[in-house]
């Protein structure tokens, strides 16, 4: 009981905004329901609950940031790559003027902004009241809460071990390296790693493989052997042939190694390009995606790629802004301003988050899939950058 009370007190370190984020998976457990894909815009009691939640998050986060004496949040939103994501979201809201669904675009853009402000407010609270190691602990706490509730949601309809292990494909994989590099692991760190390793997400596995380069930024004595191991694997791939290696791994259950075997993502790319050619301003943030994808019979609510989503919804300008944001994030995560002890896990996590943006529902569309974990991670990276560069000001 004392341990539980300690966890509750620690959970409050993120302020009231942190509590709102921590109860989000509970709200989804209680009120989310399975619905047909073509019912994405229908409004029922479940939808009203999530609309109310978005408004509460926006109001509470705005007040927290506005009333705070610390400039941390303001710096985070104006002097890091996060400013480009905010610009993208605001432009998404403006696109309601030419959207195929005025109300759907308006709300989904508002929802994104509400969650961005909520996460920024959480970071401001954590970085102005906690030591950096405690900040990592709070992040781990949040990830574990999300994983546990994802397991409960899955248990409502199946007890299949494979389905349970795949229930947190987005959250667990994005923060895999944060748990992996944690110095004094406890059961929940291993929970994150197990859920990530058995997530069944090909996109995440590619990101985790790419993220292994982060070992070069550690002080471990195994750095050289690991680097040589990665070099040996890369050499083997070159000698055997990339196509054969891919066929035996990523495409082991496919007939061939080709873009056509990427679960229809090639079709989504074609639709995104054609939409930009005919509608250079896009069809409206998020609303344009299901509208055009259903009309092509693709049966997807999202383009499964941040740039494709940006292109369909916001046209060429959307792709440009999202591209700038992702490129700026790449350079930021490698910045020397980020404390050295956190650079390696954040670099590893970034590659997983970036791959989710390239192959799963993530940034560029509504709050869905990998949107929350990737936005939370990218904001965490920017926060450590602010902490390292503007420590005297915040």
Image (cartoon, helix red, strand yellow):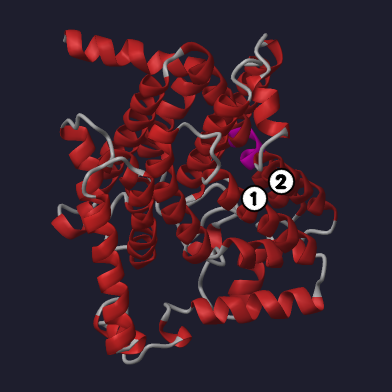
Could you tell whether 359 is left or right of 52 in the image?
A: left
Looking at the image, which residue is at 46% across and 28% down? 21
User: Hey, which quadrant is residue 98 in on the image?
Assistant: bottom right
Q: Are marks 2 and 1 in contact (CB under 8 Å)?
A: yes
Could you tell whether 119 is left or right of 138 in the image?
A: right
Residue 154's place in the image compared with 53, above or below, is below
Main secondary structure of the magenta stretch: helix
Judged from the image, the secondary structure of the residue bearing numbered disc 1 is: helix
Mark 2 or mark 1, which has the lower sequence index? 2
Q: Quadrant of the N terminus?
A: top left
Tell me residue 340's x, y (percent). 43, 35
Could you tell whether 258 is left or right of 303 in the image?
A: left
Could you tell whether 85 is left or right of 14 in the image?
A: right
Q: Is residue 250 magenta?
A: no
Judged by depth in the image, the label closer to the viewer, 2 or 1, is 1
Residue 31 visible to the viewer: yes
The span from disc 2 to disc 1 (Cα, nearest Å) is: 9 Å
The mark found on residue 86 in the picture is: none
Q: Which residues are magenta?
A: 111-115
User: Badge 1, how many Cα within 10 Å: few under 14, some, many 20+?
Assistant: some
The mark found on residue 84 in the picture is: 2
Q: Of residues 264 and 176, which is closer to you in this image?
A: 176
**Residue linked to disc 1:** 328
Tell me residue 185's x, y (percent). 19, 32
Residue 383's place in the image compared with 328, above or below, is above
User: Hey, which quadrant is residue 302 in on the image?
Assistant: bottom right
Tell me residue 58's x, y (percent). 64, 27
Residue 282 visible to the viewer: no
Q: Quadrant of the C terminus?
A: top right
User: Badge 2, how many Cα within 10 Å: few under 14, some, many 20+?
Assistant: many
């Amino acid at each position: 009981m004392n341990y539980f009370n300690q966890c509750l007190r620690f959970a409050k370190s993120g302020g009231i905004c942190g509590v709102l984020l921590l109860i989000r998976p509970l709200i989804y457990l209680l009120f989310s329901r399975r619905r047909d894909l073509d019912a994405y815009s229908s409004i029922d009691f479940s939808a009203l609950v999530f609309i109310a939640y978005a408004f509460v998050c926006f109001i509470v986060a705005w007040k927290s940031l506005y009333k705070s004496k610390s400039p941390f949040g303001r710096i985070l939103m104006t002097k890091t790559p996060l400013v480009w994501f905010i610009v993208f979201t605001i432009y998404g809201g403006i696109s309601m003027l030419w959207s195929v669904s005025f109300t759907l675009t308006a709300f989904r853009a508002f929802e994104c902004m509400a969650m961005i402000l909520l996460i920024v407010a959480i970071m401001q609270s954590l970085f102005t009241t906690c030591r950096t190691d405690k900040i990592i602990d709070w992040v781990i706490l949040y990830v574990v809460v999300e994983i546990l509730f994802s397991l409960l949601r899955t248990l409502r309809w199946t007890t299949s071990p494979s389905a349970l292990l795949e229930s947190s494909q987005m959250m667990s994989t994005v923060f895999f390296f944060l748990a992996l590099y944690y110095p004094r692991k406890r059961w929940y760190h291993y929970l994150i790693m197990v859920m990530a390793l058995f997530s069944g997400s090909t996109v995440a596995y590619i990101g985790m493989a790419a993220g292994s380069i982060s070992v070069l930024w550690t002080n471990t004595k195994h750095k050289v052997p690991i680097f040589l191991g990665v070099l040996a694997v890369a050499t083997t791939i070159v000698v055997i042939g990339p196509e054969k290696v891919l066929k035996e791994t990523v495409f082991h259950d496919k007939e061939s190694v080709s873009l056509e075997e990427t679960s229809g993502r090639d079709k989504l790319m074609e639709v995104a390009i054609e939409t930009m050619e005919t509608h250079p301003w896009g069809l409206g943030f998020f609303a344009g995606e299901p509208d055009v994808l259903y009309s092509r019979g693709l049966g997807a609510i999202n383009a499964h790629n941040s740039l494709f989503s940006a292109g369909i919804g916001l046209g060429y300008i959307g792709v440009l802004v999202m591209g700038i944001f992702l490129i700026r994030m790449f350079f930021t995560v490698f910045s020397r301003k980020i404390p050295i002890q956190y650079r390696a896990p954040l670099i590893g996590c970034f590659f997983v988050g970036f791959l989710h943006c390239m192959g799963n529902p993530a940034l560029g569309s509504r709050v869905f899939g990998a949107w929350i974990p990737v936005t939370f991670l990218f904001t965490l990276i920017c926060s450590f950058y602010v902490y390292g560069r503007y420590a005297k000001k915040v």
